């Protein structure tokens, strides 16, 4: 199986179009036409992780964080670690792909996996995205209604939640006058035409839009099909930020703190006290999710778990919601499980091993008075 076939499956689950626009999700280094030996999944890629992947004969590494984020101005093999990493990747013919904010924002991605790890039930987005829906309107001669609509559906148009093949259709009349250089399928050039047409409307997710438009050009009978694309502000069922759910049973604040430490395997974490004496409704966001604090409070969540929380954000949350900084790596690492599940489902070659890096790549250590370092 080629690496690019695998990438297509990952991007079907976590489309690039939903990623943060300044992100560098996607291919980092390598050749996507190579055949996969084994696959290594990690939150971060550094020289140590690369050596582990090489030992396990993995030639495809999927790293949550991109290894190339800011533009690289020089490859300096004498002094720069990033340059040495890229050199070693290329010399060993290793391909690196990053599933970053597309994995953060997709349904079932990083925050959903974190919520699952905490045993939450009825998990849904904390905030749905309203940035990824389009409406395609096209005008089709009646005889081609079936062919055009079915082809657009097959290309990914007309999906609303659990419903597919959704469309709106209304009969009308289209007019056109082809120039002497035109080649009309209906009528003749340089003759004003007035024909029965159907106005066909379908909703399209941003990640299917190119495919749907290409399909329209292929199947529409006219030389120049007429169509309009509208950007919508509808909430998206499949893309959003953070996740929320309920604990199976209510816990006291102390019980919940202990529960969080156990479930996420944390030795230490920072928190500020909220309002509720018991915890049932929990919001989470893997990585830096402070921006969702007000949303979690409005949602009446009893607790909000994320990472990279600043002092003043703890103050904003105090006495309103139990606010927990469980660590950046620690809240994102479970997201790798979602990719592993997609790959296990899609790769039929059982000789290909899918290995998740064990251990932490977090650079953050904790020091205490006794001199213990965790
Ligand atoms: Zn991160």
Image (cartoon, grey):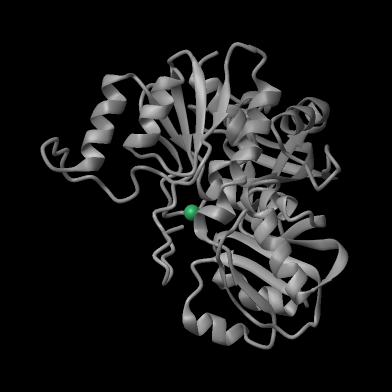
Is residue 106 found left or right of 28 in the rendered image? right
- Name the spot of residue 43 as percent of width and height, x first: 49, 44
Where is residue 131? Give x, y as percent. Answer: 61, 58
**Residue furthest to the left:** 78
Q: Would you identify the image quadrant in which residue 225 lies?
A: top right
Position of 349 relative to 94 (above/below): above
Above or below: residue 306 compared with residue 107 = below
Q: Nearer the viewer, residue 99 or 217?
A: 99
The tally of labels here is 0
Please report the residue visible at 39 percent of the width from the left and 39 percent of the height from the top: 45
Whether residue 232 is visible, yes or no, is: no
Q: From the viewer's side, name the closer residue of 171 and 241.
A: 241
Instruction: State which quadrant residue 119 falls in.
Output: bottom right
**Dividing the picture into quarters, in which one does residue 10 lie?**
top right
Residue farthest toward the right in the current orientation of the protein: 249
Q: Residue furthest toward the front?
A: 370
Question: Where residue 129 appears, x then y in whole percent?
Answer: 65, 59
Q: Nearer the viewer, residue 128 or 268?
A: 268
Residue at image position (65%, 13%) is 350
Is residue 205 in view from this perspective? yes
At a point 44% along the width and 63% down the height, the residue shown is 366
| Apparent side of residue 177 relative to residue 283 in the rendered image (left or right) | left
Q: Residue 238's spot in the image, x, y percent?
A: 71, 49
Q: Residue at x 74, y 35 (%)?
A: 140
Could you say which is closer to the camera, residue 169 or residue 152? 152
State which quarter of the image contains the N terminus.
Answer: top right
Q: Locate residue 195 relative to residue 98 in the image: left or right.
A: right
In the picture shown, does residue 252 fall above or below 286? Answer: below
């Amino acid at each position: 199986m080629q690496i690019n076939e695998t990438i297509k499956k990952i991007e079907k689950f976590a489309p690039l179009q939903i990623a943060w626009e300044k992100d560098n999700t996607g291919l980092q280094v390598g050749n996507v036409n190579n055949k996969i030996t084994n696959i290594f999944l990690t939150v971060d890629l550094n020289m140590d992780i690369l050596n582990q992947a090489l030992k396990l004969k993995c030639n495809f590494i999927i790293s949550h964080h991109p290894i190339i984020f800011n533009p690289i101005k020089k490859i300096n093999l004498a002094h720069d670690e990033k340059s040495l990493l890229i050199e070693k990747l290329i010399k060993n013919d290793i391909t690196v792909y990053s599933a970053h904010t597309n994995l953060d924002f997709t349904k079932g991605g990083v925050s959903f996996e974190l919520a699952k790890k905490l045993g939450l039930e009825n998990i849904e987005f904390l905030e749905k995205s309203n940035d990824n829906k389009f409406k395609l309107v096209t005008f089709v001669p009646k005889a081609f209604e079936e062919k055009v609509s079915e082809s657009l559906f097959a290309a990914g148009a007309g999906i609303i939640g659990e419903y597919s093949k959704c469309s709106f259709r209304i009969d009308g009349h289209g007019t056109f006058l082809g120039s002497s250089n035109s080649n009309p399928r209906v009528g003749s050039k340089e003759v004003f035409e007035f024909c029965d047409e159907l106005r066909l409307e379908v909703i399209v997710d941003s990640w299917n839009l190119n495919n749907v438009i290409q399909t329209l050009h292929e199947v529409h009978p006219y030389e120049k099909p007429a169509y309009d694309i509208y950007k919508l502000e509808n909430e998206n069922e499949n893309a959003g930020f953070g996740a929320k759910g309920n604990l199976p049973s209510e816990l006291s604040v102390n019980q919940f703190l202990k529960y969080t430490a156990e479930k996420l395997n944390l030795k230490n974490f920072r928190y500020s006290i909220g309002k509720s004496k018991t915890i049932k409704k929990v919001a989470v966001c893997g990585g830096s999710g402070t921006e969702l604090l007000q949303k979690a409070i409005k949602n009446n969540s009893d607790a909000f778990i994320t990472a990279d929380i600043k002092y003043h954000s703890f103050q904003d949350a105090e006495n309103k919601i139990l606010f927990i900084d469980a660590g950046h790596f620690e809240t994102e690492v479970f997201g790798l499980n979602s990719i592993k599940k997609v790959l296990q489902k899609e790769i039929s070659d059982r000789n290909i091993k899918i290995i998740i890096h064990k251990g932490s790549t977090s650079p953050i250590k904790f020091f205490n008075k006794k001199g213990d370092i965790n």
